[in-house]
Image (cartoon, rainbow, N blue to C red):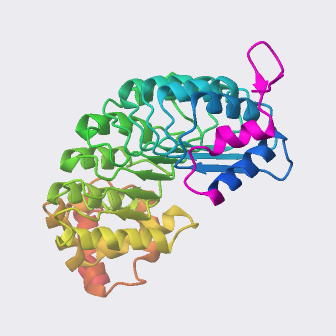
Amino acid sequence: MRRRRQSQNEYEFSDDEDHEAFTSASRNEATRQLNTYKISRVKRNHRDEKYLSLANEAFSYLAWQKLGYYIARNDQLECLSLRRCNLSDENMSAFFHGASRNKQIKVLTLYGNSFGAEGMKSLVPFLQHSHNLTSLNVSGNNIETDGFWWLLQGLRNGCIEKLNLRHCELSNMSMLEKQHCYLPNLQVLYLSDNSNIGVDGCSSIASLLRRSDTKMKKFYLNRCNIGDEGVTIIAESLVNNTSLCYLELETNNIRKNGLTALLKLLNNVETIQATYNSNHVLRWISLKGNPSLSHETFNHIDSALKLNQQYVGENYHRVGRAKVRQSQLQSQNRIILSRLQGVDDYFMRPFSTVTSEVVSNYLALVGEDSGLSDLYQLLLGMNSELGFGNCAVGKSI
């Protein structure tokens, strides 16, 4: 086999050797020819070759090593996808021994390979040097807790925005609570299909969502066995969150208590102040596959989400006022929501902690969708709770 020597440990295949190494495991002639063409352009650093995608391949250790070296020398490639390519721990070591020197790749997909924690360890040098990498997909690999630890070590440069960890056999998520493992630019996180995350994992995830500087916009936690308790932890962590707008919690055995926690997050009717300060950012929650979708609480969750959607991009105070009008001033809605959330004395308690600023903002809009009888109940409750004195509420109405 002819080899053109480049250094003590690196050499380049001839075109014929490339064809043999990179196409011998391909399924058909068309795939073989396409692989040869794409890898040849990467090898020659072709300026128009921005995306390399290989799927269902089974390259040898030596072929992975050479492809890694070709990618290391390439400064045009931006997206690399290696899906179901039998990248074992050993092959990951061979490939990233060279590829770790590439600093241009922005999107890396390693879905459905067979590597574990050792394969993730081989990926770390690449991640540490990839200051342009914004999207990483390692779903469908059994990286487990140790691999997750290695992953966070590699991502400490803080550039990653989208991270896909579906079906990775994750359980212990406590590393997310460590300051040195924080991913400050993370916007999209997929953790679905990790059934061992459970309630304990939710506590660690909550610490990420609770941070005032988080940029998380979309979060996927489907089929993670979190139940009502886990959902409650997630909901409580989002009370003051101002970034997350999309949440998936499908098939998690969520029942009445979990739905109540989500409803309280979106429209807390304990007081007017609580309603006014509810979460107005979250616009979509997917709850498919849970046993309680027919519960009336779900309908009120949907109503609150629609209000958040209606006022998207506007001042959050407008959403707060709209929720107060619909949930506190309209007697029938207030009664139903109070019952669903376990709030008693629904005519009086809404005003127990209201501030003068909220009162003035609320009264400015109180007549838009309301009748005189509801206005009377509002003023009567405010008179009793806020100590306005013996004002003649009835006469003023």
Query: Residue 24, can we see it?
Result: yes
- Residue 86 in the image, given as x and y percentages of width and height: 49, 39
Query: Residue lying farthest bottom?
Result: 371
Q: Residue at x 25, y 85 (%)?
A: 373
Residue 349 falls left or right of residue 314: left
Nearest the viewer among 5 and 285 is 5
- Residue 34 in the image, given as x and y percentages of width and height: 69, 55
Q: Residue at x 77, y 40 (%)?
A: 16
Q: Residue at x 26, y 73 (%)?
A: 299
- Residue 360 in the image, given as x and y percentages of width and height: 45, 66
Residue 244 falls left or right of residue 11: left
Query: Residue 178, can we see it?
Result: no
In the rendered image of this protein, does residue 252 appear above or below residue 272?
A: above
Quadrant showing the C terminus: bottom left
Q: In the rendered image, which quarter is residue 279 located in?
A: bottom left
Instruction: Count the marks.
Output: 0
Nearest the viewer among 216 and 190 is 190
Magenta span contains residue 2? yes
The magenta stretch spans which residues? 1-30
In the rendered image of this protein, does residue 86 appear above or below residue 337?
A: above
Magenta span contains residue 374? no
Q: In the rendered image, which quarter is residue 146 located in?
A: top left
- Residue 385 in the image, given as x and y percentages of width and height: 24, 59
Residue 154 falls left or right of residue 268: right
Nearest the viewer among 106 and 245 is 106
Q: Residue at x 39, y 48 (%)?
A: 238
Query: Residue lying farthest top?
Result: 8
Quadrant showing the N terminus: top right
